[in-house]
Amino acid sequence: MIEFKDIVTPVDCEVTVETTLRDALEIFKKKKWNLLPVTDAEQNLQGVFTRSGLYQMVLDGGPLDAPIQPYIKKQARSIRIDTPYREIEQIVKTSKVGTGVVLDEQNKVIGLLTKTDMVGALLKSANTLKDQLETILQHSNIGVLMTDGGMQVVYANEAFAKISGRSIDSIMSRALDEIFPGLLNEGNTPHHYEKFKSILHISSYETVNHEEGKILLFQDISEFEKMAEELETVKKLKLTIETTLENAYDGILMTDEKNMITMVSPPLLELFNLVKTEVLYKPVDQVLPQLKLGNVFSSEMAEVSDFHEMKGIRYIVHRIPIKKDGKVIGAIGKVMFRQLNEVSELFKRLQKAENKASFYHQQLQKSESARFTWDHILSKDSYMEKLKKSAAKAAKGRSTVLVRGESGTGKELFAHAIHNSSARSDGKFVVVNCAAIPEDLLESEFFGYEEGAFTGAKQRGKIGKFDLANGGTLFLDEIGDMSLSLQAKLLRVLQEREFYRVGGNVRVKVDVRIIAATNRNLEEMVKQGEFREDLYYRLNVISLNIPPLRNRVQDVEYLITGLMRELNSMLGTSITGISSQAMTALLRYGWPGNVRELRNVLERAMTFAEHGKIQAEDLPDYLISQLSRPVTEQISLAEDAELGAIKKALSQTNGNKAKAARLLGISRSGLYEKIKKYQLSV
């Protein structure tokens, strides 16, 4: 853009009212100006001395030494230097004066502006713009065709020649309708011109002869069509990849060059219990650091991880770099956990490791050691947590512990955990199931026998369970099934800490801690004479009453999660969850077989499950029937069972609420609330 100051002619001479005709003539001759600005000593404009004034002074016969003052025009046209350029253009167009005086911001004379200067500047600017426009048009991808008022071509650029397939020389100075018949009939609205595969824009302009010329712009869309085709191909490819991911059997994950997750498959989300919206476009090292997918950006090599485990499911990660021009631009993580054919070598190594582990596990079992700790007893029930704390305290001492509860509630787990958290944890943990061993062999199992003690006895005799457990713990399971005669001998061992082997006469001293367990009502058995009262009090030093699963419904879902993790590891399955319908059936069931029954049902369902999740049809029929039973009926049945259990406990304890609460595995205040609920009179 031209600036005003660039077209002003500076005034570098001083003309005042005292200047003589001779001096004025010299300046006019030298500068060739049309007027001289007349100023005072401070450069303030006083008027102008024009060529016509000069001529008049000469004609009047004025001497050369005469001052020019009488011929100065007082009314002089002036323009400030800060006047906008567009106003200058308008002034030049309308003014009848050929030259104007230019003033600075303080209204001091600084120069002259002539129409010649203005025209020259505009011509220079126009030429510059013309050169710039031609450069732009020559290098533009838009084809340009221009006609004059007679519709003859006056301009065409290389882009149009390429689009039309005609050389510029064959187009110039020819009638447009002759070269491209009907082109001007296309209308002025931008539209698709199929012949040149372009978008055509037609506009008009005014020529120097005030005629109407045409400018035609052709925007080539062949490149756009090609890009659209490529984009469509990319969209189809993306859809194919997404469909593959959605139906992939194993877990698949993709990242970009910044290691941000761009795609993820549902099986992977299920395995790691994630939600797609919380994973996409997040750093993979932040969301799934265990995959270590960032390794391929540094190594630039595909690699396979060792075996890992999630929810009891073993998996391996195949890390694959995505390369372009030798540079890693992303990564693919393939999490294989449902079939491992591609990693048979690792699988063989695992098999060998498992065989060794199984062998050592069998040897460990033979060595009579406790396998469970408090962490294996899964519960969120407040009473169960309190019971575990009480049992952990009892474990620190030497007193006999009696664990009571229905079959399948986990009495043996408590016994194992008590041993492992006691001072005898380094000693052996010996289990005797009093209901599984025939009565005539139970005594020899307990105390062992000497050589030749009875027919069929081993030649060197045999040591008993008490001998094996010396210095450790003896767990007597189902002690309510022990005969009265053996109860008497067991009582002597508990009191005297010594015994005689069968067929022997040497006293054997032992240091054994007893943990007993039963699902029977020992108090009732004492009344009926089926269990020795003195042994009952000897065993019932510390009593732990494990509540049935139906009394801690909130534990069912928590146990399902833990048991599924354990069973996945044991069965080699890859079950990631359970359907809502199947979960409803499990939660509505009363579980008379307690945790043992729950574990068996889950083992069956996980064996039959075919879709990665347990469905309702994978459950036993008696459990599926829970879905069709009204909830009110289920509640009624549960209440009837609860009421019956409370009445039985109160009856067994002769109305003693504290003892009844212990038998039921609930708090005393909880028992009072239930007595009030069922309006029992005690």
Image (cartoon, rainbow, N blue to C red):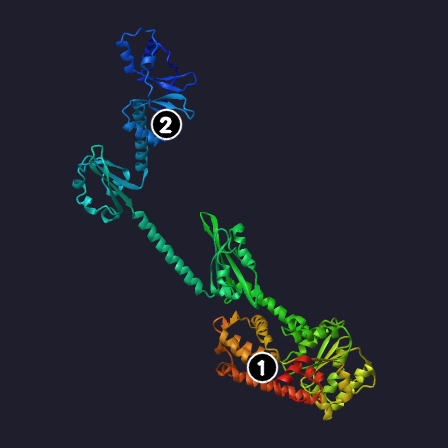
Query: Are there few (<14), some (14-19), or many (20+) residues within 10 Å of tag 2?
Result: some
Query: Are there few (<14), some (14-19), or many (20+) residues within 10 Å of tag 1?
Result: many
Q: Residue furthest bottom?
A: 528
Q: Is residue 261 left or right of residue 475?
A: left
Q: Mark 2 against mark 1, which lies toward the viewer?
A: 2
Q: Is residue 446 left or right of residue 190?
A: right
Q: Is residue 639 above or below residue 304?
A: below
On the image, the x and y values in percent for residue 495 come to 81, 83
Say what amino acid the circle numbered 1 marks: Trp
Q: CA distance from mark 2 to mark 1?
A: 99 Å
Q: Is residue 183 above or below residue 511?
A: above
Secondary-structure class at tag 2:
helix
Residue 458: in sight, yes or no?
no
On the image, the x and y values in percent for residue 343 come to 52, 63
Q: Is residue 133 left or right of residue 565?
A: left
Please tell me the numbered disc located at residue 580: none
Q: According to the image, label 2 marks what residue?
A: 4
Taking depth in this image into account, of 109 and 483 the one nearest to the observer is 109
Please tell me the numbered disc located at residue 591: 1
Taking depth in this image into account, of 405 and 298 the one nearest to the observer is 405
Secondary-structure class at tag 1:
loop
Taking depth in this image into account, of 66 and 596 the one nearest to the observer is 66
Q: Is residue 151 above or below residue 127?
A: below
Q: Which residue appears at 43% of the width and 25% of the height?
A: 106
On the image, the x and y values in percent for residue 198 come to 27, 47
